[in-house]
Image: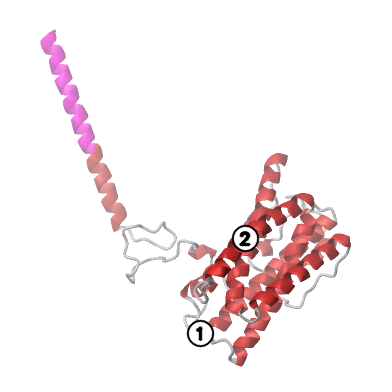
Amino acid sequence: MTSVASQLQHNKALLTSAFYRQQQQEISSLKQQQQQQEVTPYHPVAENLDKSSKDYPWKWRSFLPEHTYKPNLRVDLTRHHEPMDFRDKVALGIVKFLRVFADAFFRKRYGHRAVVLETVAAVPGMVGGMFQHLQSLRRFKPSGGWIRVLLDEAENERMHLMTFMAIAQPTIFERALVLLTQGGFFAFYAFIYLASPKTAHRIVGYLEEEAIISYTQYLQEIDKGTHANIPAPEIAIDYWQMDKNARLRDVVLAVRADEAHHRDVNHLKANLLYKKKYSEPAPVQALRHGDVNPEDAFRQENRST
C-alpha cells in the first residue's frame, strides 16, 4: 500500500509539473502573439514602444483619437444673456468684478492669462458634474447626459491649459497664484452650486462671455503683430484635428469657439432650471461640440430622459 501511495504521489507531481509547464508555454505564446499584433490608436499604448519612433501609434495619454474633433467656428460669438432676475444680476456682477482684477494683473499678456485662468475655468465643469453625479445616485435617476456634458467641459478646459503651456510658461508667482485662486474658487463655486445651481451655471455662462472677449482681443493682437503667430503646438493640432501647418491664430480661434460652446451650454442649463425643467436632458449637440441655443429652454417641452 505504501508503494502504491508513493507511486500515486509521484504521478500527481508529474502531472502537476506538466500542467504548469503547459500553462507557462500557453502564456508565453499568448504574449508573443500580442506583441506581434499591430497596435492601433484605439488600443492601449504599450509601454515598451519607442515613443520617438514613427511607428508609435498615438503619443498622447491625456486624450485618445475618438476624443478629438474639429471646432465649430461658425458658432455665434455675439450671443449675450440679459439678466432675468436678481440672481442673474448677482452672477453678472460677480463676473464683472473678477474681470477687473484679471485685466489689471495680466493686461495684454494673453498667453499667461490663458494659462492661469484655464486652471480656474476647468473647475466649474468638474464641480457641476460631481454634484449631478451625486444627485443621480441619490434619486436613482439618470442625469439626462448632464454629467458627461459637464465633465467634458472640465476636460476641454484642461486641454486648453495643456495647449497654452506649450506657448507660455507661468512664472513662480503665477504658479503660487494658481494654488490660491483654484482652491478658493473651488470652495466658492461648490458653495454657490449647493445653494443655487441656476446661479452657478449662470456665472459660468457670463465667465465664458468674458473669455470670448479676451480671446477676440488676443486675435487682434496677433493680427497686429504684437504677438508672434507662431506654429501651433503639436498637441493642439492633434486635439482639434488641425492642418499640420496650423498657427497660433488657429489655436485661439478653436479655443474661442469652445468657450462659446460652454457659454451656451451653461446658459441653457440655467434657463432650464429657471423654467423648473429639472429633468430636461442635455441636447445631443452639447455632447458633440455643436450649436446649442439657450433660448430652446423656453420653447421645448420637457422630455423624458
**Up-down relation of residue 216 to residue 185 (above or below):** below
Q: What residue is shown at x 65% (from left), y 50% (from top)?
A: 130
Nearer-the-camera pick, 198 or 17: 198
Q: Is the magenta stretch mostly helix, strand or loop?
A: helix
Residue 29 in view (yes/no): yes
Residue at which label 2 appears: 180
- Give the residue drawn at x 57%, y 81%: 250
Point out residue 229 in the picture as x, y percentages from the top left corner: 54, 86
| Label 2: which secondary element | helix
Report if the CB atoms under discs 2 and 1 are less than 8 Å apart: no
Circle 1 sits on which residue? 230
The segment highlighted magenta reads 1-22
Left or right position of 85 against 264 = right
Quarter occupied by residue 260: bottom right
**So how many labels did they put on this image?**
2
Question: Left or right of 47: which side holds 32?
Answer: left
Answer yes or no: is residue 158 visible.
Answer: no
Above or below for 151 versus 8: below
**Mark 2 surroundings: few (<14), some (14-19) or many (≥20) residues within 10 A:** few
Rendered image coloring scheme? secondary structure
